Amino acid sequence: MIRFTQASKRYPSGHDALSNISLHIEPGELAFVTGHSGAGKSTLLKLIALLERPSRGQVLVNGQNLARIKRRQIPYFRRNIGIIFQDHQLLFDRTVFDNVALPLIIAGHPRAEVGRRVRAALDKVGLLKKEKLYPITLSGGEQQRVGIARAVVHKPPLLLADEPTGNLDPELSSEIMNIFREFSQVGVTTLIASHDLELIQKMQARQIILSQGRIIDDGVSAGAEQAP
Amino acid sequence: MKKQESSRRTQGPGLSGKLSSYFTRHAQTFFGTLGQLLRAPFSMLMTAAVIGIALALPTGLHVLLQNAQLLSGELEDATQISLFLKQSVNEDQAKRLVNKLQNMQEVGKVRFISREKALQEFKQYSGFGEAMKALQENPLPHVVVINPAIQQTSERDREQLLSKLRDLVQVDTAQLDVEWIKRLYSIMDMIKRGVWILASMLALAVLLVVGNTIRLAIQNRRDEIVIIKLIGGTDTFIRRPFLYTGFWYGLFGALIAFALVMMALYLLSDPIKRLAELYHSPFNLSALNLESAAVLFAAGILLGLSGSWLAVGRHLKDIEPG
């Protein structure tokens, strides 16, 4: 699903965010990217979502070489990805329903289908009763779940999450993680950047550890290393 | 590219659904942007009023110019022909000629100015009175001033009448007094061009006003644009609401301009009527006709759209997520 081949990213400032990254993530896999802040987690996700382009090497997503995607085609490419942000990135002047419906409206789905799919997505994250509310009235955990519903409403084959539990307490965090696991179980490739090591240990999933822009470990966490 | 399109097809909705939802989205954006503008009616009206005034100025001048053209057409009907008689013709012969002319079908009014009267008038009005005293004899001929009959309106009819009058034995020269109308026309051509120049400058002003308003709207909705780009919104999708906003500004601006021009014409119509009555003219100020109104609205909408298009084209590229 995702393949990095000796990919590097150097920002115009001269900072090397990623150096010589090679990795492969299978379709339907659930994987975590961890490491200290500044290790390159976000940059890795940005390269996949074409928010940044690699300075060297190549990135393939769903069989597509991202270097071949022109600026004009990026929106269509992004429709195959659900992206979840630490700060939710919700529109506060629209209801929960309208926020979640946005990807479908952008893709031009008929009205009836939009309603059906939005409610299905909200049901999945347990917010069906709050569709008419505005995001500002929701708790942090609920806002994050709206973000997740929006990321999955158009059923993308790939889900990217950047610190999705960054601002949440442990209980809410594991709730969110369980939602991600459910998605990966139905075949959605899920890549989560997080520094919540304790939580990742519990998930027993593949863990790609970055340090200073390099992969220093890649394997299933399964209690192999205990967090200090 | 191929792969991407095929994956788009499997992911996206069907063609007929896409088409119907396309129109639904357009209608929603169309009315959605209107609703958004009406929720802040004061600031919307301020912008629309600026556009309206800028559009009203050339429109109003255009209407006045059209009226002036109508009026000058009427004046042209009132053309006069002056017959300067030969010096050898005496006053009795001249009066006989006047009688003959009055019986001609093509001739309307006839007025006789004897050479003595002409001299008197000349002394009185020209300021050369003292100089004239030095003259041994009256150098002026008898003059007959003719208004062609009302039927004689076309230029050819007038030319025919003119040559007929020239052939009369008593007549030295016959002169059609159209010089001043030609001058009036060239003055009006100049004013017309001036109105065009003014209109172009004000059109540019409207473009800038709309462009600036849309630029601010884009800045206010920066976060929204970033989010929409992140989840796969095309530039077309992002551009659409701003273009419709520009459309509404143009439309409301044109409406205000229309109202302003109509109001100004209403205020002017009474005094102009009174003035026309003093000249015994049935002239009436005519309002903005359908064609000019259509041009006004089309221009307003077009300027609104292009102004927002320019702003969106310039500023949307600067907003990228990441």
Image: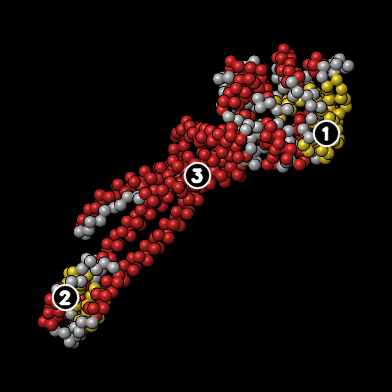
Q: Which residue is mark 1?
A: A4
Chain containing the residue with disc 1? A
Left or right of B100: which side holds A190? right
Do labels 3 and 1 touch, CB within 8 Å? no
Mark 1, secondary structure of its residue: strand
Residue A144 horizontal/vertical position (percent): 67, 21
Residue visible at 80% across and 40% down?
A55
The C terminus of chain B: image quadrant: top right
Visible residue check, residue B56 = no
Q: Amino acid at mark 2?
A: Leu
Residue visible at 77% across and 36% down?
A64
Residue visible at 71% across and 30% down?
A81
Q: Which badge, 2 or 3, is on the more N-terminal residue?
A: 2
Label at residue B101: 2
Q: Nearer the viewer, mark 2 or mark 3?
A: 2
Query: Of A98 and A209, which appears nearest the observer?
Result: A98
Q: Quadrant of residue B118?
A: bottom left
Alpha-carbon span between mark 2 and mark 1: 106 Å
Residue B34 horizontal/vertical position (percent): 48, 34
Q: How many marks?
A: 3
Q: Which residue is mark 3?
A: B304
Circle 1: is it few (<14), some (14-19), or many (20+) Cα within 10 Å? many
Mark 2, secondary structure of its residue: helix
